Amino acid sequence: MADPLDYIRGFAVTFKKLFEERLTLEYRGGNAKPGKPDEKREKAVRLHGRHVLNRYEDGMEKCIGCELCAGVCPAKCIYVRGADNDPADPTSPGERFGYVYQINYLRCIHCDLCVEACPTQAITESKLFEFSFTNRSDAIYTKNELLVDDDGRPQQMPWEDWRDGEDEHTSGWMRATSPSGDHRYEGVVAWSGELGHGVRSPEAGQSDSEDESPSDMATAEVEQ
Amino acid sequence: MILALDPLFLDDIGLSIVLIALLKVGLAFVIVLVSVMFMVWFERKVVSDMQHRIGPNIAGPWGLFQTLADGLKLLMKEDLVPDRSHRFVFKLAPFLAIVPAFLTFSIIPIGGNFESKDGAIDLWGHDTFLQVADPPVGILLFLAMSSIAVYGVMLAGWSSGSKYPLLGSVRASAQMVSYEAALALSIAAIVLQTGSLSTHDMVVDQATGGFGGFIPNWNLITTGFIPFVIFLIAGTAELNRPPFDLVEAEQELVGGFHTEYSSFRFALFFLAEYLNTITMSAIIVTVFLGGPSGPVLIEQIDWVWGIVWFLTKLFVFLFSFVWFRATLPRFRYDQLMDLGWKILIPLSLGWFLFLGALDIGNDRGWDSGIVVAVTVVVGTAAGGLLMAAVRTARSERLSQEVDSHG
């Protein structure tokens, strides 16, 4: 038998909430009328947002058109076609490059398997999450929209409401503590530099650095 | 037979009196619709405040026009009539829900000068009550209308030709019928106290007298709180509001009896639901808290004060209903029936008999101490017998279930 006073306490709890802080932020996606608040919550570092296609520091595309991302995609939302590089004016440092690259965001479930599958860290997920397109063809982002610009920053879609700093660290997921889930790689930079950012230092690890030293990767530079 | 005790109709009935009566009807209609709009907004706002949310805040100042926007959206939706429905009944049901809700409001006094003019106010030289009608059957109209509202819910579910609405309406009708008994019995205590069925007489009765000069002579106090508590609980159940909203328990029944309804027909059910909430609060205020009676602070605008007191009291109950919703989890169906049949109905019946005994004792000049003592003894014995009966029945049922399941 419950304490009858518990019912009264329950009512006291809900009444007290009337005077507590509201957790809802008044997000209006940049469409606020003057004088109205338009707040946006700081996104988690590893948020699975929309993808970007990265480039090397010299401006070459990282994508080699291998289609591994398309193969691993459980939602079948990625369409890639590779083509041979022109030897005189290569698009990517390898033999082939991503000639067509499309992601259908009506299908994408943001599982990040494509990011894990990519052998060159060409595709990463940013923290950008706004997908307020109004027709189906807008939902398909092509290479034009996905590829970073000449400064290494993602392209802004018309429906995206960027706040300061949101276009940075768009390869944040790849700088996770231990790439590919292998703890021996913790604190080790295992990817090449990107356009506009170079090689960024890895995130702080979760385990103690003493007992988990990256002995297998002795030659790698450890920045921490 | 007198159809209305309103002083407006005591003189010869001329054009001006007809116009005043029509004005009252029109005003009541508008007030009801606007207050429903306000109530929906208020409920959403308070519930979200109690859940750390903001609630509607875009349409109009503080989101006040959110209901209007929702209503307009509903009107523009496609009006679906399911293929397997009983077409005529399906279309009739929403009106069976909304019309009683409107009619009930007509017996509620929403204002008047109860200090010196017996609840009347002066409208262009004619004395009149601030209520649409004051029929001699009074509060019985409320009970009758809430019974008719059961038909709306029941027929809506039955005529939809679909299983979830049917289950929802079976629940609803069982729940509303069983809680109506407790509702009526607690009102019977008030009728005993007042000696009249008229809602206006009830307010007049509560407006005079009082204890020690500052405690009002409300039925809440004179009938000893128990009928009020029973009425509040049974009223919440009658409204199908949380924690008694099994009728539309989304997790079990999709949308309950109005699953198949869309567009304006759904809007009518929605309107009726909130209308009933307001009406039920108003009935509680009228019956237990003296309605619009209260001190007239400035004599020149005596008509204002009745409305002010009425709205203040009404607001308390509207808030309470929202508060219940934000706080209490939903009852299980057998708990609901247990509460109704095994606790509320016996308790309200026993309390009614107790008040009756006290009344008769006063008339005959019996010692009230002895009356109370005898009632307590009889009441305890009856309660004990009831509990024993319930327990025996339950253990027999359980043993049968054990037998049948091996």
Image (spheres, rainbow, N blue to C red):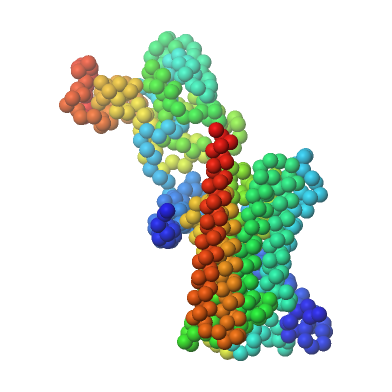
Image quarter of residue B239:
bottom right
* Relative to B251, residue A193 above or below: above
Quadrant (top left, top right, bottom left, bottom right) of the N terminus of chain B: bottom right
Query: Percent position (x, y) of residue B68?
Result: 63, 58
Quick check: A171 left or right of A217?
right
Residue at the image point whose x is 81% and y is 49% from the top:
B88
Image quarter of residue B347:
bottom right
Residue at the image point whose x is 72% and y is 88% from the top:
B125
Residue at the image point whose x is 39% and y is 12% from the top:
A94
The one nearer the camera, B52 or A45, is B52
Image quarter of residue A166:
top left
Query: Count the marks: how many?
Result: 0
The one nearer the camera, A86 or B267, is B267
Query: Percent position (x, y) of residue B287?
Result: 60, 74
* Relative to B328, residue B198 above or below: below
Residue at the image point whose x is 56% and y is 37% from the top:
B403
Quadrant (top left, top right, bottom left, bottom right) of the C terminus of chain B: top right
The one nearer the camera, B184 or B131, is B184
> Can the viewer see residue B211?
yes
Quick check: A169 left or right of B374?
left
- Residue that protrudes farthest toward the left in the picture: A210
Query: Percent position (x, y) of residue A162?
Result: 44, 41
The one nearer the camera, B242 or A46, is B242
* Relative to A51, residue B230 above or below: below
> Can the viewer see residue B77?
no
Query: Percent position (x, y) of residue B205?
Result: 61, 82
